[in-house]
Amino acid sequence: MSTNKKYNTFNLSLVLLYLAYFLTLQYVYKIYVTDIYGYMGYMDQFDVIKFISSALLLLIFINFTKMDDSALGLFSSICVNLVLIPSLVIYSGKSLPNDFIIVTYIAMLIVVILPQYLVIPRIAAAKINVSSYIRIMLVLTLSVIMGIILFGGLRFINFDFSRVYDFRREAADSIPGIFGYLNPIATKVFIPFGLVAALIRKQIIFMCIFILMSVIFFRSYLP
């Protein structure tokens, strides 16, 4: 009985946090984002009906979302916070077409909700120890960086924060388009996974290398 009460309280708290996060992002979008990034198309076209619909869609979604401390619960929370809620905010704040939120919502249902009701067989794979995994991530990341350097990307490295995006635009026009696909993989897969593995093994040198490589990507060319 106490366990059920504990999880019910936890879920209610999480629901309230989701709603608070949604309202906060909506406020930030309307007051700050539209003022600073209006020239990029982030206009203040707040729609009350879409705002209410977004709040209802969020409540419905999280009602079917696994909210606990399991791996699936963590994954669900990440998807809700980083994809669904920001999408709902832009949908209502910019008054985007209904097609936008329909496609996003269906995609989230497939990725987050459907796996909770399916029994997905595990795929057997060769085991790789953590140290080897770190080195693999390191080699793959360095390969992307070397590719950028070979195509002249080194000249775009820049440590003036105010000009980072100017350099990125120049780099995007000068470096082969394939790096538009390779760079996000390196910065969002290879580096984070390598850094986490290095943290687990407490390998300070590799941690520093991965952090340095992330800085290089940010200061040079990151689509």
Image (cartoon, rainbow, N blue to C red):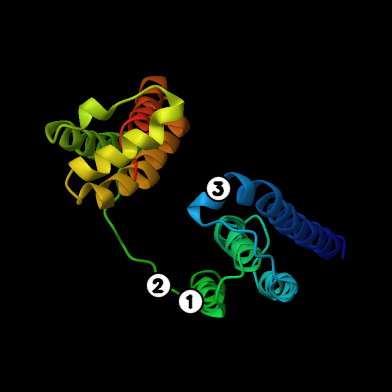
Between label 3 and label 1, give the one nearer the viewer: 3
Query: In the rendered image, which residue does mark 3 sit on?
Result: 37
* Of 182 and 195, the residue lying toward us: 182
Question: Residue 28 in the image: x percent, y percent?
Answer: 69, 49
Q: SS at mark 1?
A: loop
Between label 3 and label 2, give the one nearer the viewer: 3
Query: In the rendered image, which residue does mark 2 sit on?
Result: 121
Q: Is residue 202 visible?
A: no
* Of 66 and 88, the residue lying toward us: 88
CB atoms of marks 1 and 2 within 8 Å: yes
Earlier sequence position, callout 3 versus callout 1: 3
- Residue 143 placement: quadrant: top left
Tell me what residue is drawn at x 54 percent, y 79 percent. Answer: 102
Q: Amino acid at mark 1?
A: Val
CA gap, disc 3 and disc 1: 44 Å
Query: Relative to residue 205, is residue 34 depicted above or below?
Result: below
CA gap, disc 3 and disc 2: 45 Å
Residue 30 circle label: none
Earlier sequence position, callout 3 versus callout 2: 3
Q: Amino acid at mark 2?
A: Pro
Which residue is farthest front? Answer: 39
Which class describes the residues within 10 Å of circle 2: few (<14), some (14-19), or many (20+)? few
Q: SS at mark 3?
A: loop
Query: In the rendered image, which residue does mark 1 sit on?
Result: 119
